[in-house]
Amino acid sequence: MFDWDTGNLNHISLHGVSRVEAEQAVLNDPIDLQFQDGAGEERVVQVGETNAGRILVVVTTIRDHLIRVVTAFPAKRRIRKVYLAQRKSANEGGTEETELQE
């Protein structure tokens, strides 16, 4: 399901994020922030939560039908706050839309 090698593993480790955390953030119903065209491929910027409650920004792309994590890092306070508000609103059945990008 995921495409890992020393390049992307080393990169996310520089941000203090583990492979397991990045995968959890992608799989735990993240919120899409934006779509980008980077290095000739479509990339998705998402904010998601690990099983332990850590909120991360994760950038992914699809290569050979696998999800490749390009980078992942802890979300800044503003993004965490908005993410949690959106999750709370979604759990309460709200339709509030809030700008997540800084």
Image (cartoon, rainbow, N blue to C red):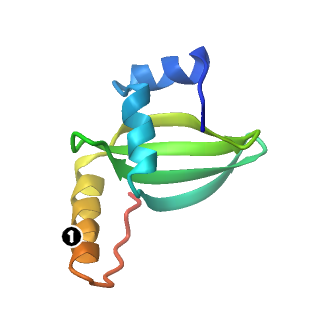
Residue 89 drawn at (x, y percent): 24, 76
20 horizontally vs 84: left or right: right
Compared across the picture, whether 66 is left or right of 73 comes to right
Up-down: is 6 above or below 78?
A: above
Tag count in the figure?
1
* Residue 34 locus on image (x, y percent): 54, 60
| Residue, far front | 1
Q: Residue 68 falls in which quadrant of the image?
A: top right
Amino acid marked by disc 1: Lys
In the image, is residue 50 above or below residue 7?
below
Q: Which residue is drawn at 37% across and 51% down?
A: 48
Using the image as rendered, state which of residue 52 and residue 70 is in the foreground: 52
Q: Is mark 1 on a helix, strand or loop?
A: helix
- Given residues 19 and 71, the one toward you in this image is 19
Image location of residue 91, percent across then percent down: 24, 73
Q: Is residue 63 above or below residue 94?
A: above
Whether residue 36 sits left or right of residue 85 in the image: it is right
Residue found 59% across the figure and 25% down from its top: 4
Residue under label 1: 88
Q: Which residue is drawn at 39% across and 41% down?
A: 24
Near mark 1 (Cα within 10 A), the count class, few <14, some 14-19 or many ≥20, is few
Q: Which residue is drawn at 41% across and 20% down?
A: 14
